[in-house]
Image (cartoon, rainbow, N blue to C red):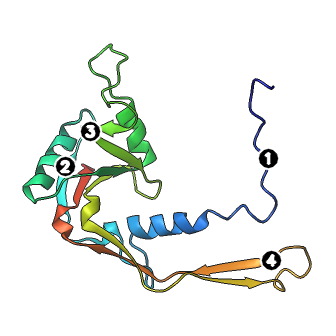
């Protein structure tokens, strides 16, 4: 019996893009894109603004209490990879190696979700019970074997009609660092 697991096998050619659909949906949810893309988180004009300072966790406490004053409970903080790294490097005190962030990617008991499509300096506090993903039509998959006739490849296109609903946009807390 081997001590180490076998290395993962490389994907067959052509399957490299199998995970693009979730990435496209995430990008649509997190950013503002041109029509016909659905309106995402950054398009909300009524989100509640909170100043973001990444020297300590005070901004996160302010965000949580601000959300609770609006009847929401923050269930996740969405952040860029750069800001997540900054948070991970915060220490309990000067000269300490103990991280201020509790456990694995948790701030004040709330998970941190790294969202590569968010810009550095912007963190959103969201209450999942107030956000809806609505699928209008079934997912359609079109396959065309002729487009790459000169090689053994096929073209696959996936179409999905989807939108996002925000029950109370003011309960979304948008934390932004000073410029």
Q: Measuring 73% from the left and 83% from the top, which residue is drawn there?
A: 143
Residue 20 pos. (x, y %): 60, 65
Q: Earlier in the sequence, mark 3 or mark 4?
A: 3
Q: Secondary structure at mark 4?
A: loop
Mark toward the viewer: 3 or 4: 3
Location of mark 1 (residue):
9
Q: Which mark is residue 154?
A: 4
Q: Earlier in the sequence, mark 2 or mark 1?
A: 1
Q: Are marks 2 and 1 in contact (CB under 8 Å)?
A: no
Q: Are marks 4 and 2 in contact (CB under 8 Å)?
A: no
Q: Secondary structure at mark 1?
A: loop
Classed neighbour count for the residue bearing mark 1: other residues with Cα under 10 Å, few (<14), some (14–19), many (≥20): few
Q: Is 29 on the left or on the right of 178, as rendered? A: right
Mark toward the viewer: 4 or 2: 4
Judging depth in this view, the residue of 64 and 135 nearest the camera is 135
Q: Earlier in the sequence, mark 1 or mark 4?
A: 1
Label 4 to label 2, Cα distance in Å? 49 Å
Q: Measuring 46% from the left and 66% from the top, which residue is drawn there?
A: 27
Where, quadrant-wise, is the N terminus in this rendering? top right
Label 2 to label 1, Cα distance in Å? 46 Å
Location of mark 2 (residue):
51
Q: Measuring 26% from the left and 62% from the top, which residue is drawn there?
A: 129
Q: Which mark is residue 109?
A: 3
Q: Is residue 77 above or below residue 26?
A: above
Classed neighbour count for the residue bearing mark 4: other residues with Cα under 10 Å, few (<14), some (14–19), many (≥20): few
Q: Earlier in the sequence, mark 3 or mark 2?
A: 2
Quadrant in the rendering for residue 140: bottom right
Q: Residue furthest left?
A: 69
Label 3 to label 4, Cα distance in Å? 47 Å
Mark toward the viewer: 1 or 4: 1
Q: Secondary structure at mark 3?
A: loop
């Amino acid at each position: 019996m081997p001590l180490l697991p076998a290395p993962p096998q490389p994907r067959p050619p052509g399957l490299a893009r199998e995970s693009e659909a979730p990435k496209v949906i995430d990008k649509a949810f997190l950013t503002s894109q041109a029509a016909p893309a659905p309106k995402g988180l950054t398009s909300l004009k009524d989100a509640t603004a909170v100043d973001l300072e990444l020297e300590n966790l005070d901004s996160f406490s302010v965000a949580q209490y601000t959300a609770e004053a609006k009847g929401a409970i923050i269930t996740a903080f969405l952040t860029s990879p750069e800001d997540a790294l900054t948070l991970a490097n915060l220490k309990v005190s000067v000269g300490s190696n103990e991280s201020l962030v509790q456990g694995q990617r948790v701030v004040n008991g709330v998970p941190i979700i790294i969202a590569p499509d968010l810009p550095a300096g912007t963190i959103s506090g969201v209450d999942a019970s107030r956000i809806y993903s609505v699928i209008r039509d079934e997912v359609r998959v079109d396959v065309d074997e002729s487009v790459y006739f000169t090689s053994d490849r096929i073209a696959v296109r996936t179409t999905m009609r989807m939108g996002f609903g925000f029950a109370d946009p003011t309960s979304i807390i948008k934390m932004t660092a000073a410029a």
